[in-house]
Image: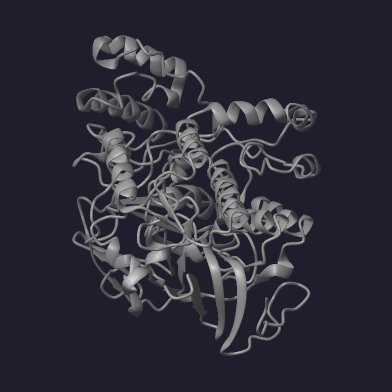
Amino acid sequence: MTATNTVAAADGVNAVKAENKTTRLDALVIGAGVGGLYMLHKLREQGFNVRAVEMGDGVGGTWYWNRYPGARVDVESLEYSFSFSKEIEQEWDWTEIMASQPELERYINFVADRLDLRRDIEFQTKVISMTFDEATDRWLVVTDSGAQFDAQFVIAATGCLSAPLTPQIEGLDSFTGPVLYTNRFPKEGFDFTGLRVGLIGTGSSGVQTIPVVAEQASELFVFQRSAAYTRPAGNRPLAPGELDEAKADYENIRYRQRQTFAGTLRFGAVSVEGVTPPDRRILQTPLEQRIAVVDELGWGAPQAWADVLVDLDANKAGTELYAELIRRNVKDAQTAEALVPHYPMGCKRQIIDTGYFETFNKDHVTLVDLRKTPIERITPNGLQTTDGHYEFDVLYCATGFDAMTGALNRIDIRGRDGKLLRDEWRDGPGSYLGLQVAGFPNLFTITGPGSPSVLANMIMAVEQHVDWIADCLTSLRDSGSRVIEAQAEAQQAWIEHAAALVEGELRASESCNSWYLGANIPGKVRIYMPYMGGLPAYRERCDSIAAAGYAGFAIA
């Protein structure tokens, strides 16, 4: 099956990258994060000639690239883990309720070693182009190393948040000190001790890293354009016996996870099962009773109402409860008001934090509200706003990603008739089930736009996609078929169905500007990219489509 193969070192890092050599495969997997690793394992287990390519020099995906101080998962570690292997479940020991980046990276490396996956991964290999050959019904994949792959199927496990953004600020290149990014933080770490730090961005990575940086820096300026809805994580080490109890109950935990909307029973340390009574409506509740709910539920109070996420007036009332909680935790009144979000609650994914608001009570931490005093430019020794100049030694950017589509759009992907995928997605990313795009046969996307993906526990979403794709390829092989392609009509029907689910929802309204909609990318068409129907309904739909002979797909 291999025409001229690439020689790889035993540790998985390429020893030789021969130029202009083509490896013939049944399937090529792009990415060695949780999706790519499980896909590689699953197809290898089912007898396919498969390899994976990975841009980094190690496995982990999100948890390989995002190693900034404070990086942590936002659902329980016990649930944010692979469920396909009972052995792995029992052999790995978590230490915290919500694992930090180093522990998550160790876990993923453990899985890769336990399944002996490295021998089939080409590391430090970036895919630059993919072309579908209609004469052979195969993909030619070209990488930056010169290695090429001729594959019948390509599975893109490129991740939803893996295309980092560099802020487009005048003078960025002029800064003379270190410039750091949360989405590509130095592998060896960075010591902020005694340094003045200017940090731009208060999304998830900013919220997580700010308290840690504040512990080291002599002075910290936080430049905030958009305040975040965040709540305390409630993280802690697992208590003695707690892990053993969970391991003994894993079968029940997994069953319950698969029944929940987001594939998780707890968001941070907070249960998501039955937290909002359907008859509790904030607009029908007197103010003093709303405050009583704040006293009772704390940070859970703002969203503990049936009408807050569907009615704009109710949402504003919920935000006022959130503002009350901020005022209780931030001493300076002006800073507290600046930390109150100005967009609807639920518009963006809520963040969990460790000591975020309390950090702004420290004398050496300054919040700069960019809505009032926008950035004009970066200078050699700091940052100029319309209100003044701030001097610092280190510029630290927590500026996010081109979400959902960015990683694929950065590859030159050409399907039938030479169609370029990024052109097909120019008016919004269309797909069938988030699994395939019409006009691009034999190309699958794990947690692609149009699937639950980022609205769910990502490992649960990944496992469902990988299992479905593996079963599909096995079915094609057993039937002697070699091509599967989403039909344009089925794709359009799925797009309309997904859009109908968020019609009238605040999260998709003009008042909301989130990366779910691509609103953080200038010029990107606004379309709600995740599937809002929840994992159980989505899984049921995918299973029924497969049972109907892969309805909506053309098979040749």
The colour mode here is: one colour
Q: Can you say whether 525 is above or below 260 in the image?
A: below
Q: Position of residue 458 (x, y in %)?
A: 53, 45
Q: Nearer the viewer, residue 285 or 459?
A: 459
**Is residue 74 toward the left or the right of residue 238 in the image?**
left
Q: Say which residue appears at 55% left-offset and 76% top-offset.
A: 150
Q: Can you say whether 291 is above or below 28 in the image?
A: above
Count of marks placed on residues = 0
Q: Say which residue appears at 63% left-offset and 89% top-offset.
A: 18
Q: Position of residue 495 (x, y in %)?
A: 30, 45
Point out the image quarter for the N terminus.
bottom right
Q: Say which residue appears at 59% left-offset and 50% top-offset.
A: 475
Q: Nearer the viewer, residue 454 or 225?
A: 454
Q: Say which residue appears at 28% left-offset and 67% top-offset.
A: 423
Q: Nearer the viewer, residue 101 or 162?
A: 162
Picture quarter containing residue 170?
bottom left
Q: Position of residue 68 (x, y in %)?
A: 54, 58
Whether residue 265 is visible here, answered yes or no, is no
Q: Position of residue 70 (x, y in %)?
A: 55, 51
Whether residue 18 is visible here, answered yes or no, is yes
Q: Nearer the viewer, residue 326 or 484?
A: 484
**Is residue 169 toward the left or the right of residue 65 in the image?**
left
Residue lying at the far bottom in this picture: please name it. 19
